Amino acid sequence: MLSHLINTDLGNRGMGKIYPEYRLHNGDFVKKASQELFEKLEHVLIVTGFPVPPLNTPENDGPAGALAIFHAIKKLGGEAEVLTYPLVGKFLTSQGVRFIPAEEYTEIPLEDYSFLIAVELPGRSRNGKYYSMRGLDVNTSPIDSLFLAAEKRGIPTVGIGDGGNEVGMGKISALIEKYVSLGNKIVSTVPTEHLIISAVSNWGAYALVAMLSIIAGENFLTWNEEEVIKEMKECGLIDGVLLHPSFSVDGIPAKIHFTMATLMSQVVEHGLQRQIL
Ligand code: ZN
Ligand code: ZN
């Protein structure tokens, strides 16, 4: 049911059409990703940050999700680190979380990690360039190479995305080309072992946290979503659709994100009481 909720396609960007086809053969995609993560919490690397052109300022979809996953892993007794851009790092620091600057990605000792998670991270297209949903060039280093290298080493990975141009979407490139406008151009060629598709990437991350909560028997969806979005605005992260700092994410007002997070939290409470889901 969590996968239904997070694919409520309010932005009408394509996931509403892709989700029914994806779930035909991947019905338990949130559950499977959460179960493997739960078993491999020793040292998790979370990578997030999508610089949106033309200003190439990181957007606020992704960072909030990465933060929620970070806290859940810590509460479960695991270790986690976040690799991201300095502006996202400013937001994380305001929440008491340290970060590894994105430019240091080449120094990451992959062999030390048990699991990798990409939340709204640009994935290279067929010609090797990175594109926004509008088909504009994204100015980013090839950080997605971490996920290609992890696959070669057999390190499990999860990709969380909402548009088709993110790390993980290489797993469903045919569906992206079929349903997303400019899909042929922007589609990411970078697959991940697990792929969580959602209408907003933060929601995909929250679903992962919700399922970890169910597995662990403790609700980790306890933050105030409006306060988180307000803090991201104050740090200068932009709404990726409106292209300026805003009390919204992906053009959707903060109140709706608050309501979605609250609904997921209540679904978790219900699941914990009834032992269902
Ligand atoms: Zn996206
Ligand atoms: Zn988004």
Image (spheres, rainbow, N blue to C red):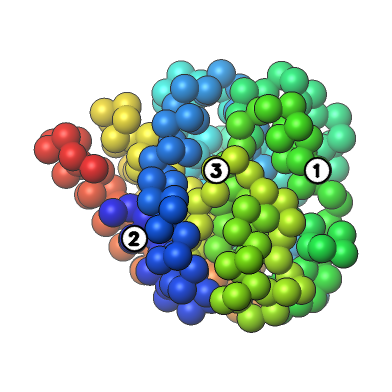
Identify the residue shown where x is 75% and y is 20%: 111
* Residue 14 position (above or below residue 88): below
Q: Residue at x 79, y 62 (%)?
A: 125
User: Which element is circle 2 on?
Assistant: helix
Q: Secondary structure at mark 3?
A: strand
Q: Residues within 10 Å of mark 2 (few under 14, many from 20)?
A: few
Q: Position of residue 52 (x, y in %)?
A: 73, 68
Labels 3 and 2 touching (C-beta < 8 A): no
Give the residue type at disc 2. His
Disc on the earlier residue, 1 or 3: 1
**187 w.r.t. 70: above or below:** below
The residue wearing badge 2 is: 4
Query: Which numbered marker is on residue 145?
Result: 1
Viewer-proximal residue among 266 and 236:
266
Classify residue 101 as left or right of residue 174: right
Q: Residue at x 60, y 59 (%)?
A: 172
Name the residue type under label 3: His
